[in-house]
Image: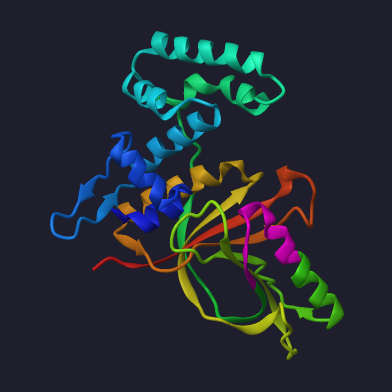
């Protein structure tokens, strides 16, 4: 099982919101320690949290979502919920276009017999290497590109030689998922000696053992990747031991076509005692 902070990162839901879900009995922790009060969650609960988050994106209230999850076996009742919401979305089309698209496949979201995409998880060691790094607290995850802009400008200014492999990496340092003020570091492996600047630090990246998942295509599938990785970590008696990071083997900067993107999701792990 996972501590609430680790589960927060895997689910991309803040600790505050997980506690709120627990209070509403929408998502109750798998186990609560009697002495410490610490909450623990299982990998299987990521499926539920992902359903909750998707239904929230569609505009359903938490009270209605609770009813829908409790009625997951009643297809006709679920269709009634979706039909009513479809009418609301149509009436507010300009504001709710995204929710309308999600509703097209909403029934399958709650069916347990839907076959999930399979992702291969492997244990590998990322070797030690030298990097050029930019680490800042930024308003949101979507603004990661600004950090890459700072790093790219310095690489050009100092004529920095990028190593092969480049290990183009984004590290997410927050101990839990945050909706704002996120601590992100971007790195590129380099060779040679260079001078630090106000924005760019040159340093070593220590070797680390990770559970690795290779992903082809756009980033919409990352929550499913986290679900697969969490289940594998739990099943194979590992535990998370450091900040999660991703390596961009083929990024939007290299190829604008999402079908060609190749991303490696890395979860530092150690054997469970």
Q: Which of 38/133 is in front?
A: 38
Residue 198 figure quarter: bottom right
Is 96 inside the magenta-drawn segment? no
Asked if one can make out residue 61 in the rendered structure from this viewpoint, the answer is yes
Is 273 situated above or below 64?
Answer: below
Q: Position of residue 147 (x, y in %)?
A: 71, 66
Locate residue 116 relative to residue 25 in the image: left or right.
Answer: right
Residue 89: x %, y % from top left: 61, 18
Q: Nearer the viewer, residue 267 or 97?
A: 97
Q: Quadrant of the C terminus?
A: bottom left
Residue at coordinates 72% horizontally, 23% vertically from top-left? 94
**Residue at image point 44% right, 68% down:** 242
Query: Any magenta on residue 141?
Result: yes
Q: Which residues are magenta?
A: 135-148
Residue 112 seen by the camera: no
At x 51% / y 44%, what residue is drawn? 223
Along the line of sight, which residue is nearer the eye, 85 or 263?
A: 85
Give the x, y percent position of residue 122.
46, 58
- Residue 101 sits above or below residue 87 on the image: below
Please, is residue 44 above or below residue 113 in the view?
below
193 on left or right of 35: right
Compared across the picture, whether 247 is left or right of 151 comes to: left
- x%, y% of residue 37? 20, 55
- Whether 192 is drawn above or below 78: the answer is below
């Amino acid at each position: 099982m996972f501590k609430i902070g680790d589960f927060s990162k895997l689910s991309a839901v803040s600790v505050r919101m997980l506690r709120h879900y627990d209070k509403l009995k929408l998502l109750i922790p798998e186990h609560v320690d009697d002495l410490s009060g610490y909450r623990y969650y299982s990998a299987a609960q990521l499926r539920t949290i992902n359903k909750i988050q998707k239904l929230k994106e569609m505009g359903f209230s938490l009270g209605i979502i609770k009813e829908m999850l409790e009625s997951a076996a009643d297809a006709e009742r679920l269709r009634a919920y979706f039909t009513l919401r479809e009418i609301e979305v149509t009436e507010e089309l300009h504001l709710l276009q995204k929710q309308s698209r999600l509703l097209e496949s909403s029934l399958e979201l709650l069916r347990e017999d839907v076959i999930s995409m399979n992702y291969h998880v492997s244990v590998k060691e990322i070797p030690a290497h030298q990097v050029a790094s930019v680490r800042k607290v930024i308003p949101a995850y979507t603004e990661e590109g600004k950090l890459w802009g700072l790093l790219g400008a310095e690489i050009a200014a100092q004529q920095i030689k990028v190593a092969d492999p480049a290990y183009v990496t984004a590290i997410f340092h927050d101990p839990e998922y945050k909706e704002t003020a996120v601590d992100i570091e971007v790195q590129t492996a380099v060779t040679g000696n260079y001078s630090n600047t106000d924005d760019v630090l040159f340093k070593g990246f220590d070797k680390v053992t990770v559970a690795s998942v290779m992903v082809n295509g756009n980033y919409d599938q990352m929550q499913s990747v986290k679900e697969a990785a969490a289940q594998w970590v739990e099943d194979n008696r590992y535990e998370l031991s450091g900040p999660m990071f991703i390596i961009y083997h083929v990024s939007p900067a290299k190829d604008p076509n999402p079908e060609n993107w190749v991303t490696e999701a890395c979860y530092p792990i150690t054997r469970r005692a």
